[in-house]
Structures are given as structure tokens and as C-alpha cells.
Amino acid sequence: MDILSTSGINQFINSYSISEQNKRIYPLESRKDKYNQLNTAWSDLSSKLGSLKTIVSDLKVSTSSSLFNSRKTSFPTNDFLSATASKNAAVSSYSLRVNQLAKSDLVLSNTMASDTSVASMSGTHTVQFSSGDYTGTVDIDLTDSETNDTIMTKISEAIKDDYAVIDSNSLVSSNTYTGAGEFTLDINGIETTISYDYTDQNYDTVIEDLVQQINGNTSGLTAEKVVDGSNVSLKLTLDDKDQYITIKQTGDTGNLLSTLGIDVENEKSTAALVNASLFSPTTGNSKLSFTAKESGYDNRLIMSDISGSALDFVGLTSSILTNRTQNIGDDDAGFKYSAVSSSNNELNAKLEFNGINIQRNSNSVDDLVTNVTFDLKSVMEATDNDVSVAVKIDKDAIKGKIEDFVKKFNDSYTYIKNRFTSDSLGRGIFAGDTSALSLMNKLSKTVMSKVEGLTDDKLSYLSEVGISFDPSLGLTVSDSSKLENAISNTPSQVSDLFNSENGIANTLYNTVDAYLGSNGTIANMKSSYDKNLKYIGDRITSINNSIEKSASNLRSQYEKLQMQLISMLSSQNFFSQSSGGFF
């Protein structure tokens, strides 16, 4: 009778549910757990393979930028110079002496009383600066109520705030132009061709069309139409102070550039060519300095008043500027350094290189030896010894990359291998996984086998450069000296070992690449696992619903039996009582 009690029914139904779950759901849960573990394992391995792919991608480069072309410099500790070498620099040695450091051209104004009033400079003054290949002009607007100090301030600020601007000739708007052709706008090396074909078009229309074309087809340049009463002109402004513009005719032309007067070459802002600084050498006095942005004789400053007399006013007369007159005293105007010629000047770096006298514009000399840069720091005295600079194979960089390769290889290889073996919890997650086994075999075969395509007298095994392979542990740099000697003495053979067509790095890259990526082996397997996980999850849900439904049906049946039993017991009790009344 206890089985039909409420507690008995609950116990029976629970036992049924547990029994069904053990038979039907727990096997599915085990399969689900296995797929989840595989998903995690392959995700972790994918990350490790990605790191291996990155390192072998570096090692397989066989062009001039190959790691195996790495170079470094060696020189004694000194205060005079340093040197760096990039890839492919010739292994060699050089002797250097620093006799003069490169300097930026420096021009000084007169020293002038700061507060002295000036009423004679009202108007716009245009000054031109040239340095190296570039030229710039700047306008300085002055009033009739200036002082020496404010004039110098306005000159300095005008240069600092300057942008390269090209203003065309002012043309009568209603006058007509006929011509066809094209011209090129070169903005910092990027060329844009502007074509035109006008027949009896007035200049207002011509300028509007040019503005539309230039603004619609160029980057970094703003074109505007400027209207001045009945006249019109074209204004071009570079957006970047440090860029240059060249405007030149190309092909057949109607000489529009000449008509407009905008055929310029290497025009820059004065802000890109010179630094202008105002300072007070003594109390109550002002002085202006102009310093070239670039050092060396080729970048010396060439200055002039184009209109007005701003430079002349501060003491930089036409004579001083034309003759490069040096200032005699601290209060005088003139050039700080002499620059008589390319060979006789105080602006260039001067050095002796392997006994030959050399001059350069900069203290960073990168065009003397291919892929080697010499940085000059201070001038040497006659008693100082020459500095010897050696360019060598960068053995440490190459060896370090190879050691990194060994580590990244082992991270992937041992991760796979350790997941084939059984542990206290049972078989490894990759046991029976043919994809993992295939990858592990490919990895081991690549590093153990001879590199095909290399002649017998060349290095063709990793073991020949001191790198051994153990099936249990992976790769090991077992003979560091052997690896260093191979890098130093036969660098091209070490390079071929890794980056030849069948080299180790190329082979490993292709192997690993096939497993990675959106269409790789790992992505396809994980996609399959996800589908199986979804199927199992849906199946578990369905079975659980089925078990719950069956349990509910059983409960209903037992509850009916319980009601029938209660009814029978009630009837029995009634008959028992009735029988007792007859005796």
C-alpha cells in the first residue's frame, strides 16, 4: 500500500526519471563534453599555430629584407660618432674622423632699441626665402604706429603662420580667353593633370572652371576665385605648411599658366624653410634671428625683400644678403657662418672617411655606405685617434629569431603530443583524432628531414646547425656554438636551410597555413563540432521533455490507482461496519 502513497509515488517517479536519464541522456552529455573539449583544444592549438606561423613567416623571407641579411655595427665607445647598419649592408670596416659638424644657416638682424617708434613702414612688405630646392614668400602687414620690437614680432609671426600661397595675375573679368591644353599640379610628389579647352570664354568663367577642377581632383590644395571690382584672379593655398607645390605645363598648351602667372616650382611656406625668433640680447633691446630648418651648405638661406623693406629695416640690407656678409659684433646684422662655396664653408659636416675628405649637409650621413648610417656628434681634436667602425652579420638577432622559432614550434608540437597520451582521467583528447595525428607527423617530419633542392655540400639538416629533434620534447638548440658558427661563417647556407623553396620555414608555413584561417582545417572541424553540439543539445532537450511527459503520465496513472484504492478501502470499511450490525 505504501507504493500508492504520495511519497511512494514521488519516489517511484524520481527513480524512473533518473533511470531514463542514465540510459538516454548521460551518454549524450559525455559526447557533448568531448566535443566541447575538442573545441577548446583546437582553439588553443590554433593560437599556438598562429604564433608559429608568424615566426616562420619572418624566417621564410628570401628577398633583400630577409632576417638572415641582418647587420650590426661595432665601434669603440667614443664621443664623436655612432653608426647603425640595416639589412644587406656590406660586411666591412671603415675609419672615420669628424672635423666639422653640420650647422643650420643663421642670419641675425641688428640689435635695435625695442620701444623706438616707427611711423614709416606702413603697408605690406613681401619677403622671399630660399633654402635647398625650395622657395617661399611671406607678406608682413605693418601700420604707421609700430615700434622696432613690434615690427620684429610681426615679421616672426608672419613667417611662423605662413602657408604656401600662389596668387595669379589679376585679369579683367569680362575679357575673353581662347586656348586649349593642360598643366600639372605636383603636390609633394603627387601629380594631378588639369585639362582645359576654352573658346572666347571670359576670365570669370575660366577661373570658376579651374577652381572647380582643382578642388574636385586634388588633395591638399584649396583653390579660390578672388574678385576685386571688375578684376578676377585665382588663389591657390597648400593645406600643409611642410608640403611643396610645382605647377608646370604638359603637352600642347594654350599658355594659360603664363597668362595667369602661376607657373611655379618647388614653392613652400616660409614656415617650412626658416625659424624666425625674436629675443632680447640686452635689456630694452630686440634682435631677430633667422635659422634654416635644414642644415648644410645646400640648404643655406637666400633672403631678399621682394617689395617693401622689412629685411632692410632690421639691418639686413641687400648688400649684406647678396654678399653673405658675416656679422662682426654681437649687435651687427649679418650671417653667423661663412659659406663661400660647397667646399669652403662652415655649414657642412666635414669628415675623413678611409683617408678621403667628405662633406655632407647633415650630421646624419646615410649615403656614404649603402645601408649604413653614420651619426656625427662632436669634432675631434688632432690628438684623437680615428674611430674604426665595423659592419658585421647580426649573429645575435638571427640566433634569437631561430631560438624563438624553436620555442614556438615546441609550443605547438608538444601541445598536440601531450594530448594523445592517457592520464589519470583517461585517454587524451586527441587520441584517435586523425587530423591532430597528421599535423603532428607533418611537423616532426619537416624538422627531421633533409631540405630538398640543396646540394650535398650545403647545410640541409637542422641537426647540422646544432638543432636536434626529440620525439618526446620537440626541438632543442643542443649545440649553441655550432649554430653561432654556421650563422657567422655560412650565413647564406643557414638562410637557404630556412627560406629556400623547400626550406623548413616555407614548408612549415604552408603546413600551418592549411590549418588556419576561415576555410582552414581547424575552422571546418570546429564548425562540425558546433553542429554536433547543437544536435546533441536539441536531442537532450527532446529526451528530457519525453521523460518529463512519461513521468507525468505515470504520475497520473498512479494517482488514479490511488483514488481507486481509496474507494475500495472505503467500501471495505462500510461493509465491515454493516456486517457488524447484523450479529
Image (spheres, rainbow, N blue to C red):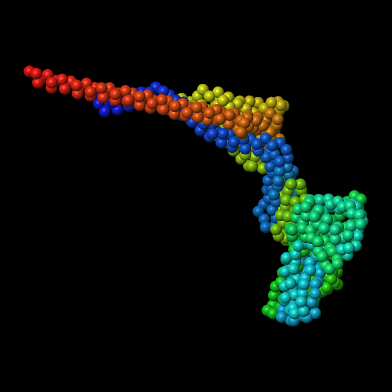
Can residue 135 be seen in the rendering of this structure? no
Outermost residue to the front: 582
Judge whether 226 appears above or below 68 on screen: below
In the picture provided, is 271 more to the left or to the right than 201?
A: left
Assign the C terminus to one quadrant of the image.
top left
Can residue 211 be seen in the rendering of this structure? yes
Relative image position of residue 48 (x, y in whole percent): 56, 35
How many numbered marks does the figure carry?
0
The residue lying toward the viewer, choosing from 346 and 264, is 264
> Which residue is pictured at 71% across the width and 43% down the height?
87
> Which residue is pictured at 26% across the width and 24% down the height?
563
> Which residue is pictured at 78% across the width and 55% down the height?
215
Judge whether 206 appears above or below 116 on screen: above
In the picture provided, is 538 more to the left or to the right than 563?
A: right
Judge whether 157 appears above or below 42 on screen: below
Relative image position of residue 164 (x, y in whole percent): 78, 61
Rendering quarter of residue 331: bottom right
Assign the N terminus to one quadrant of the image.
top left
In the picture provided, is 9 more to the left or to the right than 52?
A: left
> Which residue is pictured at 72% across the width and 51% down the height?
373
The residue lying toward the viewer, choosing from 419 and 327, is 419
The residue lying toward the viewer, choosing from 536 and 231, is 231
Relative image position of residue 175 (x, y in whole percent): 90, 62
Relative image position of residue 86 (x, y in whole percent): 70, 46
